[in-house]
Amino acid sequence: MLFLLFCQHGFSQQKKVDSLLAALKASKHDTSKITILFTLVESIANDDEWAVYNEQAYELTEKLVQSKNESISKKGKKGLADALNNKGYLSKIKGDILKASEYYNKSLKIQEEIGDKRGMEASLNNIGSLFENQGDIPKALDYYGRSLKIAEELGDKRAMGYALSNMGGIYNGQGDMPRALDYHIRSLKVREEIGDKEGIAYSLINVGLSYYNQDDFPKALDYYMKGLKIREAIGDKKGIATLLHNIGAIYLKQKNIPEALDYFKKSLKMRKDAGDKHGITFSFNSLGSAYMAQVFLQPSEKQKMLPLAFAYADSSLVLSKELGFPKNIRNAEQLLSRIDSARGNFAAAFEHFKQFIIYRDSINNEGTRKASIKNQLKYEFEKKEAVIKEQQEKERVLAEEKDQRQQIIIWSVAFGLLLMILFAVFAIRSLKITRHQKEIIEEKQKDILDSIRYAKRIQKSLLPPDKFIDKTIKRLKDK
């Protein structure tokens, strides 16, 4: 079934690649060609193949950058930054750390210039991974923290998942298992929210590793198996190789050497097929550790197992030095010291042990630990402070709105009361005026009536009586 899934996935991918190649051949514009080339880069798993298309995209974007059209030039710069990031990744997996750092930093500079925050987040994350592999923990944590901050600003949960996972990896390497587990579980939750299968598989591995480092092997194996199931479903050979190696490590811890060797060898084969040099150094070291463990479990096998253990440990050291990864060098030096001691070569064992101490202290000394914790605390403080400030600003705005509403209510009530008072004053005044006018009118009417009555009395007193007038008129008529 697994074989059929891989074949089906491979056929589907090849069909997509063929389609893209046909579109690339038919395309006449540089901008559309660049889009197709970057899609090809994302669609092809083989590093040698997609690197060819990335180089073509790099050359075309360099041409677009020179355009006098500002919009086209900006698109060219974004594409150039993406191509440089890809070149950085290729240099990293080939062990050329200086070149990888140069490409990543060039990419970051362009992204900052054009304000490409998503690109900046990716570059910061990549540069952080370089510092981590070189053992510069404070700088790695700083770059991962900056990457996480931008991812949170953008609401990019996929990027948040990567940054949280990487920061968890640092604490895991520092031996701070509770904090490492916290970051890996946070990363897993974010990835599950968006259904990022590849990311979920990574987080499952990391959570399993955290439990492994706390010697909780059943839980570790449970998470590894869940991660392996997803890796196989999506056909991720590098991820499968990592999980096979981690499962082998559990069997090694449980002193089940045959099972451990079987898983380590399967992992090594897949890593060689994928050209994963970094992973190969881990496989070499783990195989050397397994053969060395067999010596202690079966002393009679000492003569057979010690040369095998030494061969793998020495190969791990040589390749780790070639790649310039201090953590891998530290592990190989420690293992070689134990092997040489078991072989009776105490002078060589002492030299390897001194180198182990040097690399161990450079990676994990107290000053580095304090610096990394201080850096993380600074990030956490700034994050919390930003949240507090945002909350305070919200509360301030709400308080101002509340005050404004209260002011409006108060002024409205005051204005209403004032109107009522004015109306009452006006009404009372009008009532008083009306009453006063009524009193005046009534008084005038009384005066007039009194005058009329007085005049009538005067008139009656001056005029003769009616009977006298009647008699006089009658007498005059008779005459």
Image: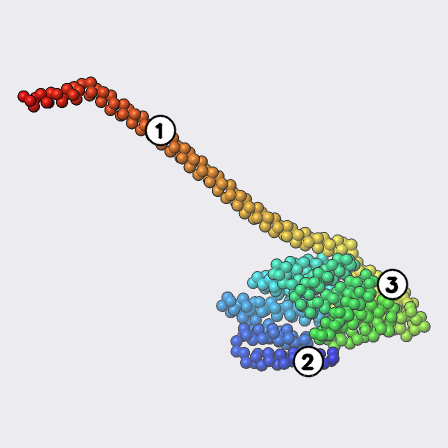
Side of 311 relative to 453 (left or right): right
413 left or right, relative to 95: left
Query: Gap in Å between the C-alphas at discs 1 and 2?
Result: 108 Å
From the viewer's perspective, is the residue at label 3 or at label 1 nearer? 1
Residue 258, relative to residue 334: is it above or below?
Answer: below
Viewer-proximal residue, 261 or 191? 191
Can residue 102 be seen by looking at this rendering?
no
Marks 3 and 2 in Cβ contact (< 8 Å) = no
In the rendering, at what x and y percent does residue 134 appear?
A: 73, 63
Q: Are marks 3 and 1 in contact (CB under 8 Å)?
A: no
SS category of the residue bearing label 1: helix
Q: Residue 132: give x, y in percent of width and height.
A: 72, 62
Helix, strand or loop status at disc 3: helix
Image mark count: 3
Residue drawn 31% across the image and 26% down it: 443
Residue positioned 72% across, 81% down in the render: 4
Q: Amino acid at mark 3?
A: Phe
Q: Amino acid at mark 1?
A: His
Q: Looking at the image, can residue 402 be seen?
A: yes
User: Label 3 vs label 2: CA separation?
Assistant: 54 Å
Task: Identify the image quadrant of residue 15.
Answer: bottom right
Residue that appears at 62% across and 61% down:
155
- Residue 294 in percent (x, y) is at 89, 71
In this rendering, is residue 444 above or below 30?
above
Looking at the picture, which amino acid does disc 2 mark?
Gln
Crowdedness near tag 3: few (<14), some (14–19) or many (≥20) residues, C-alpha within 10 Å: some
Q: Which residue is mark 3?
A: 350
Identify the disc placed on residue 436. Answer: 1
Where 263 sits versus 154, above or below? below
Q: Which residue is mark 2?
A: 8
